[in-house]
Amino acid sequence: MEIDLSLLHSKTILEVDISNTYIIPKIYYQNTDIISLSSIVVAGKVYQKEDEDYINCNIKGTMLLADSISLEEVKYPFSIKYDDIIEENCKKKQNILDIFQFLWENIVLEIPLQFTKVKDLSKFHGDGWKLLSEDELHTANNPFSELLKDFKEE
């Protein structure tokens, strides 16, 4: 969706309200770790200050991601507070702001590299292997702990 900023640029109005609920098309996130994306709620405005276009908004939504350990689908809520100059997303000569491109660029920054809600790692094991937590890794059961002590002394 493109937002017309011509009235703002002609100084007819002081700000453009961009508060709305937006749906990001699946084509935007089909090649990412996002399984699905809820409706995105945006509350904010576009305004001018010293002949620069600024945007001030809050972006909220929920991503459905695969858990990094169990691979189960997990809801990941996100909230972005954005207050900055919008130069790249606004086509100055055309007085248009492409809100989808702007939203997507900010949402993609919120995708976690790893996300899990698994608390009990004991059920993740196999023939000769088991998944360790960070605490278990640094305890006395670590077979490399003696070697690490030697390195620390030197």
Image (cartoon, helix red, strand yellow):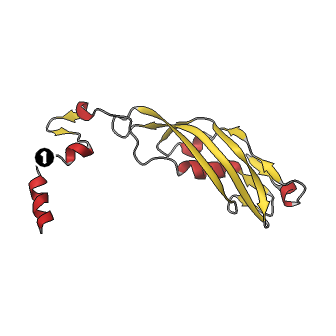
Vertical order, 120 against 89 (above or below): above
Residue 17, horizontal then vertical, whole percent = 78, 46
Q: Residue furthest right?
A: 12
Judge by depth and name the residue closer to the eye, 96 or 141: 141
Which quarter shows the N terminus?
top right
Residue 85 vs residue 130: left or right?
right
Vertical order, 84 against 134 (above or below): below
Judge by depth and name the residue closer to the eye, 28 or 48: 48
Mark 1 residue element: loop
Q: Residue at the spot x=46%, y=38% of the render? A: 65
Give the amino acid at mark 1.
Answer: Ala
Q: Residue at the spot x=78%, y=56% of the render? A: 47
Which quarter shows the C terminus?
bottom left
Judge by depth and name the residue closer to the eye, 153 or 129: 153
Q: Which residue is tagged 1?
A: 140
Q: Mark 1: few, some, or many residues within 10 Å (few <14, many ≥20)?
A: few
